[in-house]
Image (spheres, rainbow, N blue to C red):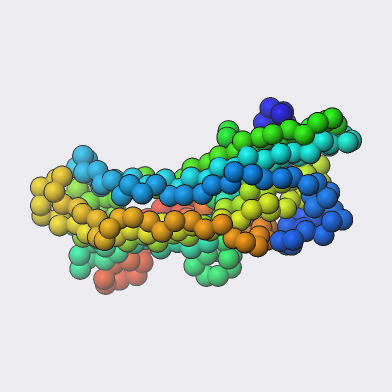
Amino acid sequence: MLPLSLLVQRDPFGTSRMGCVQSSAGCNRCPACKFKVSVTDLHASIDTTPTIIEEYSDVVLKYRTPYFRASAKVTVPPIRRAGRWAVGWIQACTHMEFFNTYGNMGTSSWEIPSLKTGEYKMISDSDGVLYPWYGATTEVAVVEGPTHSPLKVELSMNDNFYPSVTWDTPVSSGNFPHLTRITRDQGFTTWLAVMNLDSGEVRPLRTIKWRMRLQIEVEPLEDAGKRARLIGTGKQEQPYILTNNQPIPETALRKPNANDAQMLVWRPQKGPPVVVVPPKAQR
């Protein structure tokens, strides 16, 4: 396996054709489809522990959701000629509702405009360091040919939410608690994929769908540590692995990622909405 520095020396999408990125089955013509990578021991799950609420701060409430975890063992076939290949996890956000209600004062929400308007059906959830991969450690492996024997690789990733929500409205200069409810519903598609780094052609090997939903009710006048509680069981629906692969759209492979594209909007009961935190991609 090669050091990951070789993976980021150039953008494989600069001028190259995307190959069968739009084909779930592959064409058996382009290099990514003819490169027969085998996958074993594929697992995907969400921890069964409930979301943990933290009320240690006078300024913010924090919550830590259970982890989504995915892992697989991959066998890369011999590479008969010079070439570079990457195998790893790619993830995209497909749906996002994240509302924080402050009684009758209004609601704040983290929004991804391109998803909300329907311009994008999904957006990259890369760490922003190593597009299009979700991360740069256990999430991706790089191999350079020629090689003379198969190479076995173990790949894994995990994801969860650990945000801070202000007790007071995001446009307030004080810390008096007005927060009454948190609602979050976010959906993701995760692919195990193989990419020819010389041509930029990419093909999904496996496709996983998963979702994280939660509601937290808050009594703002209670003492800190006793204000917030989860509504419902707190257990998440388990991910499911698709029988047929879903194509990887271009928006899941390039900038911006979800973190850079999202913005925080305050919507008061009276008056126009206010953008509190603009998207990083526009700053």
The residue located at (28%, 46%) in the rendering is 52
Residue visible at 77% across and 55% down in the picture: 18
Residue 108 can be seen, yes or no = no
* Outermost residue, right side: 81
Residue 17 horizontal/vertical position (percent): 81, 54
Residue 242, above or below 283: below
Residue that extends furthest to the bottom in the rendered view of this protein? 270
- Is residue 18 placed above or below 156 in the rendered structure? below
Outermost residue on the front side: it is 41
Q: Position of residue 257 (x, y in %)?
A: 56, 51
Give the residue displayed 58% in from the left and 33% down from the top: 137
- In this image, 21 relative to 220: left or right? right
Query: How many callouts does the rendering have?
Result: 0
Left or right: 149 as drawn, with respect to 257? right
Q: Residue at x 24, y 56 (%)?
A: 230
Viewer-proximal residue among 4 and 246: 246
Quadrant of the drawing holding the N terminus: top right
Residue 264 percent location from the top left of the image: 39, 56
Quadrant of res 133 = top right
Instruction: Please name whichever residue, 183 or 44, is drawn nearer the observer in this view of the structure.
Output: 44
Observer-nearest residue: 44 or 52?
Answer: 44
Nearer to me, 161 or 46: 46
Q: Quadrant of residue 110?
A: bottom left
User: Can residue 105 be seen by looking at this rendering?
Assistant: yes
